[in-house]
Amino acid sequence: MSASPDVRTPVTLLTGFLGSGKTTVLNQLLRRPELADTAVIINEFGAVGIDHLLVDHVAENMRLLASGCLCCTVRGDLVETLGTLAARRARGEIGFARVIVETTGLADPAPVLHTLMADPAVAPQFRLDGVVTTVDAVNGAGTLQRHAEAVKQVGVADALLLTKTDLADGADVDALAAQLARLNPGAQVRCVVDGAVEPEHVLGIGWIDPAVGAAREFALADERVSDHAHHHHHDSDRHDAHVRAHHFAFAAPLPEAAFTHWLELMAAMRGERLLRVKGLVQLAERPDEPLVVHGVQHVFHPPQRLPAWPSADHRTRLVFIVRDIERDEIVGTFRKFVQPSEESPA
Amino acid sequence: MTHTDYLLRNAQIHTMDAARPRAEAMAVRGGRIVAVGSEAEVAAAAPGLPKIDAHGRMVMPGLIDVHNHFVWAGRAELYEVTFPPILTLAQVLDAVRAAAAKKAPGEWIVGGIFGSGLLNELTHEACRALDDAAGGRPVMLRDDSHHNRWVNRAALALAGIDAQTPDPLNGEIVRDPATGEATGLLKEAASALVEAAVGRALAADPTLDVEAAAHAVRRLNAYGITGLQEALTTRAVLKAVQSLEEQGRLSAWVVGSLPVTEAPLAPGEAGEELLAMRDHFRSRHFRPDAGKIFLDGVPTSRTAAMLEPYLADAVHGCCFRGGVTLSVPQLARVLADCEQRGLAVKIHCAGDAAVRTALDAVDVLRSFNGPGLMHQIAHASFVDPAEVPRFAELNVLADLSPIIWFPCVIVEAIKSTVPAERVARFWPNRDLLEAGALIAGGSDWPVVPDPDPWLGLQGLVTRRDPTGRFPGALWPEQALPLAAALAAYTINPARALRIDDETGSLEAGKSADFVVLDRHLFEVPADTLAQTKVLATCFEGRVVHGALE
């Protein structure tokens, strides 16, 4: 609930399916002077082609959260590696101002996010900045159809990098970009060739600006567009047909206790199917201090109140990126548990 | 033709079937009811059957006990020292001394029931006196709530409890405030530590549990019971029931309630491994299709979750209300997982705050997942008026335990922890009934020493102690009509247990589970209902108690 600037080290999660070019992106990024003070944690040996001072390798080591289900694991390896990095920095052996974690292509990104959001050993030193996901323009559409992890990687992203667009047909690239916008309308989609990406497009993209402790403005995508788009994809064998984004805006401020209880219920009852939940909430009790909502599956970041709204728009806005949850279900339970007699969400 | 083929005639049959509430004859073939009606109708529908004259007796469906720990009860009756929960501490020690005289050195002395009123006397000195009475044998005694244990030092040692042992979650190893040593009083989940030690001794001979189960089923059949819900179905219970079934001795429908969260009386039982055994143990008469959750403890040890504070005491201060073991979201999630597996959950809620939490969780479950299985609130005793209509709205059964809650020693003990005016307003059965709730009666045997459903039936109707030991009526406005009380022991629990395809009423197609009574319940004074004698109990048409003619 602090309003002071966040001095914790930002961590960027770089993910993307096998062969989607995330290592190329990482190599290009690490050549940039802005990235000189970056520690890199990767899963796979030999994948990073340059001799970066602070590359650390970790073996996968899943650990079940005490209260969680199978999807709510933390990465014990990551906890240890981040702890070691922090300790070495404290002893003056190394210096770094940010961390990039590159996951394996097949990895479920949720455990890494849980680690960064909720692990008591990690949270005092590190904060999740943003999630960057690479998608291969040539094979991406097929990968999304066949692999649930790939859809999940797209669903949790703050930024989507469409790679190998020079090798793909222009119409296919457009179709894939439209599909990504449907799966995750809040994420920026950018085309990159040969891994060339501007650092500002992938770093500092989390929607909380640590310098001022305030939220960056985030726009609601046009609900009609995303609703319209998903009607084309009702083939249940396709993994990407199950994932969609639901957006909500509420003009009236919400009672804090009822709202947080509802979020708890959503996490408990539907956690497996909540890929990512983000939002700014206007509380009835403190309408000038937006509440930040950030959840991945069952795990929600401890609620954080910000000192000010990022713009004149003080409406509550929520985005649910979900697998197989209908909008009506979210609306129905919201009405019952948060606003039994109030107007329905816009 | 076998002895499960006959036509019962000249009977006053109360079928509990709304479509045909009364009949005079019933045809049974192969253990199934083939026709119910007038003698002429039945004879025409099922010709050629030998006739049995019921001599105008009242006949009704076999009774169903919705809350019963029969294997544990059988152990208690066959192997344990038993005394009523009205003994003084000195009398309890005498009972242990007498039991010790018949036991080999080192053999366990297990038993009860001591009254909750003794809890404050169970000091370090009392523990030493228990050592002396038992001649050094390990002793474990249960209190009238069955949630607490009193043990001696030999038992503490076998349970691995010493001054360093931490209190388990939701339990307390009561310690001497001066020395920190365990006094021998183990509350709630701490009881499991010593029960486990007793369990290890029992497991050494599996026939012990099978004989205990057989004994208990015989006792229940003698009271007219032909169906029951086993309310905490552990591995040992599963094995005993399976053996009984294999030996053809399971003469009752049994629904098992597997612990789905850690249960204070069944440590280490809950979990995937137990759930995975369901189909291995499922049999013709046994359905492991219920779950069990303890959401709170009991009021006598101030572990029930109450909306209003307990009476002040030195340990808990002025404003202690107890607490629940799961939050609303946690419970809702567990219920959702259970529904997905086809488990209807019996939720133990002794306090009104626990009842509210349970109903809130079911409300969440229904809101997210829509209609599902009927779950149960067990011992729906302290119920806030605001909660009464929610049982029906949310499709939750009220599992009543009349033998525990009519004026008796437990009620007296509760008055020492809960304000008397609150105790005078519990067990709102009539309100539940009028609000449309499905209600069912259970004994919680061996929490009560006698599972006699006729005691419970009379208690539901009179709100008085049928034995006359404890005077007065508890909230008499909440008395149930006899017909509703009978439904609570027959068709209602059959529905809640999803065995109404087999039993619970007398209608064609169902199992011939019925009783012949020595009196017409609707024609005798309500205060004689408990004296009802069952002349015959038939299960699947077969006489399992008494005689048909």
Image (cartoon, coloured by chain):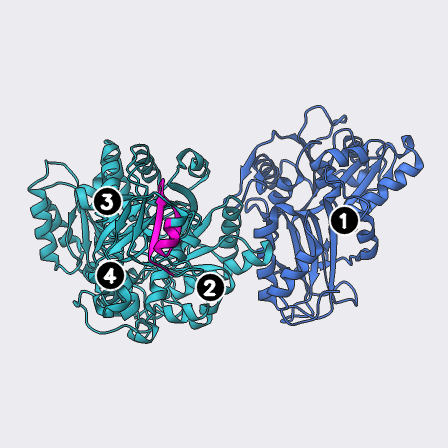
Chain colours: A blue, B cyan
Alpha carbon of mark 2 to alpha carbon of mark 4: how far?
Answer: 25 Å
Q: Can you identify the residue that label 3 sits on?
A: B218
Give the image quarter of residue B366: bottom right
Q: Over which residues does the magenta segment extend?
A: B22-43
Give the image quarter of residue A316: bottom right
- Amino acid tagged 1: Ile
Q: Can you identify the residue that label 4 sits on?
A: B455
- Point out residue A11 in the picture as x, y percentages from the top left corner: 68, 43
Alpha carbon of mark 1 to alpha carbon of mark 4: how far?
Answer: 71 Å
Label 1: few (<14), some (14–19) or many (≥20) C-alpha neighbours in 10 Å = many
**CB atoms at circles 2 and 4 under 8 Å apart?**
no
Q: Is residue B210 left or right of residue B488?
A: left
Give whichever of discs 3 and 4 has the lower sequence position: 3
**CB atoms at circles 1 and 3 under 8 Å apart?**
no
Label 4: few (<14), some (14–19) or many (≥20) C-alpha neighbours in 10 Å = many
Q: Can you identify the residue that label 1 sits on?
A: A205
Give the image quarter of residue A262: bottom right
- Point out residue A204 in the picture as x, y percentages from the top left corner: 76, 48
